[in-house]
């Protein structure tokens, strides 16, 4: 039997969330931790998505850690290779590498209620940890739809997040399935090289121009010489997005004006009225993520591109068939069909205090107190948990808010002392979730008339945060102990756990 290594904290994942958590742990004086990563390098999203044209759609100076500003972002919206290099650099600068265990996919983790710790089985060894930080990413497990006949397709098939760089698309007939954030970056990047591109579009996205430009040498020199200018730039980018949020969360009708701009953007490149009709969405802008590109529509107007306004429904040999009956013979199929977001595989691998998996606990919809803690899963803190996603701003701001919460969680455990765990009260989780869902009712994501990946199979929006990022920051500033049960191993009966209730007055006097 292999020996189990015990650590105080096990972080799962080494994307922005996991690396950010590792930096924060060190800053809090916690050095006894590991970062368990299934791949062989850091970067998460930015390691796995290497498709042509991959870039962030939130400006780089905002889409980066506040504690690791980068004066040298090459473009306003930097490409995947630069973001990946940035995260590799974060791992080096903050000396995180000794903590990282690569090729260690978490297969199962089980709460040991007697010893108040998580037992974790990975492909790289066994661990136990007092606390687990789950940073496995909302968009890390690619989803390929179940298409009849796909198995016997004789050509090449891959997902946008697992790009096969050994396969040369030049001169090939390619089917691109999906028109989401990845697809609209891929289409203009491959269109000039492929013989024919057939785009399967179930729902057209709203597309606004992306104001992307190189960041000049002078700007970079200024940022290097006067670091506060980087901060000011970030603050401005953040503030603009905060101001826009109200329209998405409270007054979706105001977004009609933005729709006009998006239509004008389309009309500028798409002269054919029939194609324009196909590409015009019939739902309120913002309901699905607003996509940013200056090159998508011009690419669709090229003679080697066919837009099929219907989903892929069948594959017959090398022929792809749309739901509306359109057929095309292709050499390769590229799926830009998103990820397992509301059914993330990790939830089946986490077994909590009552012997239930997180997936079972979340059968009626994912929910977590302040996006972080699930009832019955003590000392388990999630980064980018349920209802923390954004339609308007940078996820790094959300991640850093959750890291504040994590830091306070650890401080509270220290203050309580001894062998102790915090388990979110079901009543607190429900109350939080009720508030979130109540606010969600007015938002464009729920009222805009679209179907999106923000919703789970039962139509519940369990992914988006329905407020400003400042509100989320405030809600995650501190752990409110009255929202938790404090679980201890009783001194005389080692095998039993005793729970104590912390009252509000005790918290206030602590
Ligand atoms: C193409 C693309 C573009 C995006 N652009 C933006 C953008 O512009 N702005 C924005 O705000 N957001 C963007 N996002 C969202 C993005 O996912 C988040 O911003 C952020 O990168 C998430 O970081 P993370 O660490 O939580 O997850 P990830 O980056 O997905 O990292 C999760 C890590 O966990 C590992 N892991 C998963 N399961 C296990 C397991 N069982 N055991 C061990 N390791 C495991 C994975 O291998 C991965 O390394 C984009 C997403 C994609 C896919």
Image (cartoon, rainbow, N blue to C red):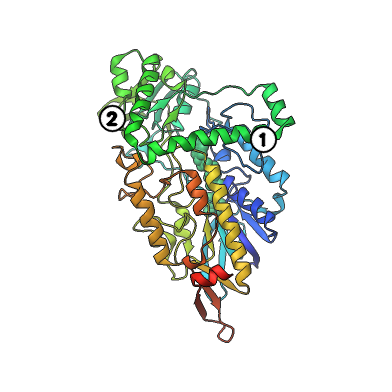
Expressed as whole percent of the image width and height from the top left, the position of residue 6 reads: 65, 66
**Extreme residue toward the bottom, this view:** 492
Residue at the image position 38 percent from the left and 60 percent from the top: 431
Residue at the image position 38 percent from the left and 52 percent from the top: 436
Mark sitting on residue 16: none
Expressed as whole percent of the image width and height from the top left, the position of residue 73 reads: 64, 30
| Label 1 neighbour load within 10 Å: few <14, some 14-19, many 20+ | some
Secondary element type, mark 2? loop
Evaluate whether residue 1 shows in this view: no
Sooner in the amino-acid sequence: mark 1 or mark 2: 1
Up-down relation of residue 209 to residue 246 (above or below): above
Instruction: Say left or right for 472 vs 201.
Output: right
Residue carrying label 1 = 70
Residue carrying label 2 = 282
Secondary element type, mark 1? loop
Asked whether the beta carbons under mark 1 and mark 2 sit within 8 Å of each other, the answer is no
Task: Quarter of the image for the N terminus: give it.
Answer: bottom right
| Label 2 neighbour load within 10 Å: few <14, some 14-19, many 20+ | few
Instruction: Say left or right for 180 vs 42.
Output: left
Residue at the image position 65 percent from the left and 56 percent from the top: 25
Evaluate whether residue 14 shows in this view: yes
Residue nearest the observer in this picture, 278 or 370:
370
Residue at the image position 48 percent from the left and 61 percent from the top: 350
Task: Quarter of the image for the C terminus: give it.
Answer: bottom right
Q: How many marks?
A: 2
**Extreme residue toward the right, this view:** 225
Residue nearest the observer in this picture, 447 or 206:
447
Expressed as whole percent of the image width and height from the top left, the position of residue 399 reads: 55, 47
């Amino acid at each position: 039997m292999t020996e189990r290594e015990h650590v105080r904290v096990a972080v799962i994942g080494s994307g922005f969330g996991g690396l950010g958590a590792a930096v924060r742990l060190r800053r809090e004086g916690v050095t006894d931790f590991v970062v368990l990563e299934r791949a062989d390098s850091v970067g998460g999203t930015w390691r796995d998505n290497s498709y042509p044209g991959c870039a962030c759609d939130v400006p780089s100076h905002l889409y980066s850690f506040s504690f690791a500003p980068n004066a040298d972002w090459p473009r306003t919206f930097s490409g995947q290779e630069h973001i990946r290099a940035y995260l590799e650099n974060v791992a080096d600068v903050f000396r995180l590498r000794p903590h990282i265990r690569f090729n260690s996919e978490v297969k199962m983790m089980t709460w040991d209620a007697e010893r108040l710790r998580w037992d974790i089985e990975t492909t790289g060894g066994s661990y136990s940890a007092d606390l687990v930080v789950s940073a496995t990413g909302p968009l890390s497990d690619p989803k390929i739809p179940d298409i009849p006949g796909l198995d016997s397709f004789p050509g090449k098939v891959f997902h946008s997040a697992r790009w096969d760089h050994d396969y040369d698309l030049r001169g090939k007939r390619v089917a691109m399935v999906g028109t989401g954030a990845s697809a609209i970056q891929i289409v203009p990047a491959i269109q000039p090289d492929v013989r024919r591109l057939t785009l399967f579009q179930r729902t057209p996205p709203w597309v606004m121009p992306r104001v992307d430009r190189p960041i000049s040498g002078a700007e970079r020199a200024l940022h290097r010489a006067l670091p506060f200018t980087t901060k000011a730039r970030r603050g401005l980018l953040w503030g603009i997005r905060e101001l826009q949020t109200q329209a998405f969360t409270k007054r979706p009708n105001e977004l009609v004006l933005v729709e006009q701009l998006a239509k004008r953007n389309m009309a500028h490149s798409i002269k054919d009225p029939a194609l324009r009709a196909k590409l015009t969405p019939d739902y309120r802008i913002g309901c699905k993520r607003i996509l940013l590109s200056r090159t998508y529509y011009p690419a669709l107007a090229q003679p080697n591109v066919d837009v099929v306004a219907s989903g892929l429904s069948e594959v017959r040999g090398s022929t792809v068939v749309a739901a509306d009956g359109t057929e095309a013979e292709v050499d390769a199929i590229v799926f830009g069909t998103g990820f397992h977001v509301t059914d993330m595989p990790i939830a089946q691998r986490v077994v909590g205090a009552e012997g239930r998996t997180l997936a079972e606990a979340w059968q009626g919809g994912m929910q977590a107190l302040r996006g972080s803690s699930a009832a019955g899963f003590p000392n388990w803190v999630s980064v980018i948990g349920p209802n923390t996603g954004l339609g308007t701003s940078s996820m790094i701001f959300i991640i850093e808010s959750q890291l504040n919460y994590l830091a306070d969680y650890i401080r509270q455990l220290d203050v309580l002392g001894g062998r102790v765990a915090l388990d979110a009260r079901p009543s607190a989780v429900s109350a939080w979730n009720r508030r979130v869902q109540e606010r969600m009712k007015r938002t464009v994501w729920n009222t805009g008339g679209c179907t999106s990946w923000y919703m789970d199979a039962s139509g519940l929006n369990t992914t988006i945060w329905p407020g400003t990022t400042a509100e989320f920051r405030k809600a995650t500033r501190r752990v409110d102990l009255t929202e938790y049960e404090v679980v201890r191993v009783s001194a005389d009966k080692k095998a039993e756990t005793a729970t104590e209730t912390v009252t509000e007055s005790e918290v206030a006097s602590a």
